[in-house]
Image: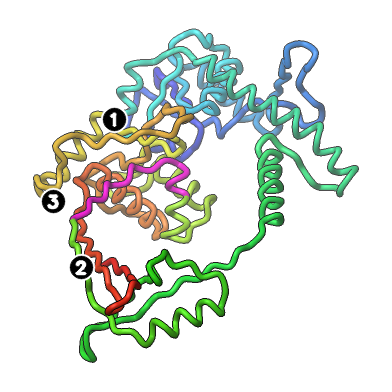
Amino acid sequence: MAKNLVIVESPAKSKTIEKFLGRNYTVRASMGHLRDLPKSIFGVDVENGFQPKYINIRGKGELIKELKTAAKKADKVYIATDPDREGEAIGWHLAYILGLDPESSCRIEFHEITPGAVKEALKHPRKIDLDMVDAQQTRRIIDRIVGYQLSPLLWRKIRKGLSAGRVQTVAVKIICDREKEIANFVPQEYWTITARLRENDKAPIFDADVIKFNGKKLEINNAEEAAKTEAALKEAAYVVEKADKKERKRNPLPPYTTSSLQQDAVKKLNFSTKKTMLLAQQLYEGVNVGKGGAVGLITYMRTDSVRLSDVATAELRSFIGSTYGAEYVPAGVNVYSSKKNAQDAHEAIRPSYIDRQSIEGTPAEKKLYDLIWKRTVASQMVCAELDRTTIVIDMSGSSQQFDHNG
């Protein structure tokens, strides 16, 4: 029997990690939560400090028995659930079930499933973070209070089957408020005019926006005004007054957070949020890459941080220099600021191995990985340089003005 037992959340992750660690380690999966609030009763003592009443989840009895047996045979048990509040709480429940002291060094965490990251985590076990556990418990208790008290009210007042929750209730309020603003908005008619111009019959056509008419900023409020302005412009001759060519720089975008990855996957890949997160979970836990077996290909996919580790940025800069040339490596590391209320507990989503530009896997997995890889590499490259030409065109002998950007 292996001397050490490592417990993770998912079977896919356990297979990947067990391959890294060798014969002295056994890796088992908890299959998510093992304890939760009961479904049949409220389960929260509101009168006594909101104490939750946890029970073992129905259907997990055999799994709990197997984990207890494995833990008794092991010299050391490491809880390696996901590195977030939910994972910390699952680890705390595991410690309770297995009779482990949460204050002992039984907890390890890693943000990418690679041999180096897992082995480094095993060198630095820590106690379970009870502050994170309390944060998860608070969220779970609020879910129960809102859901169990408001849902029956909805059944009585509206119809059966509706539910209320900690998040959806607030979201519905925001939507209703926004809908009232839309209903109360008084629309105002607004017209713009674009002239299609060219130098001669053989020259290409380009568009120029009318910005001034009769010496004033163009403002058209109805179709009649638009028709009059259009008629005046059609009869005119046009002269280029000036042309300014400027170099413009565009900064690279930061690496992905959970929300920005979901947004880009919708826009660029037409993936639903659910599909994106499922694929990202698979890429994180391990994808079969051929002879090497299953390998974790991206860092943890639930994050609100745009920060990259020092090791990752060093690897990126080296890769960019050797692959694309030194001129594409900025003088200093590109640093991005996370949103104001970001927890910044994890890195941004990035490839675990930056030199792995393409992967084996399903077409969907390949597309999402390619999106993450390109965004990560671009985030540590120099600014894009763009030429922008602005042409100001006058109607000959008048005060009309047009603007063309190209």
Q: Dot 3: within a 10 Å radius of its alpha carbon, few (fewer than 14), some, or many (20 or more) residues?
A: few
Tag 2: residue type? Answer: Lys
Place of residue 253 in the rendered image (x, y in percent of width and height, measured from the top left): 32, 46
Place of residue 64 in the rendered image (x, y in percent of width and height, measured from the top left): 61, 25
Give the camera-side residue of 81 and 342: 342
Q: Residue at x 68, y 41 (%)?
A: 168
Tag 1: residue type? Answer: Ser
Residue wearing tag 1 = 309
Place of residue 208 in the rendered image (x, y in percent of width and height, measured from the top left): 33, 73
Tag 3: residue type? Answer: Tyr
Q: Residue at x 81, y 47 (%)?
A: 161
State the separation of the CA atoms marked 2 and 3.
38 Å
Q: Which residues are magenta?
A: 247-262
Place of residue 199 in the rendered image (x, y in percent of width and height, measured from the top left): 22, 84
Is mark 1 in CB contact (under 8 Å) with mark 3? no
State the separation of the CA atoms marked 2 and 1.
48 Å
Residue wearing tag 3 = 324
Residue wearing tag 2 = 242
| Whether residue 19 can be seen here | no
| Whether residue 129 can be seen here | yes
State the separation of the CA atoms marked 1 and 3.
22 Å
Q: Give the mark nearer the N terminus: 2 vs 3.
A: 2
Q: Dot 1: within a 10 Å radius of its alpha carbon, few (fewer than 14), some, or many (20 or more) residues?
A: few
Q: Residue at x 52, y 11 (%)?
A: 102
Quadrant of the rendering where the N terminus is positioned: top left
Relative vertical location of residue 91 with respect to residue 164 in this rendering, above or below: above
Is residue 399 within the magenta segment? no
Relative vertical location of residue 11 with respect to residue 97 in this rendering, above or below: below
Is mark 2 in CB contact (under 8 Å) with mark 3? no
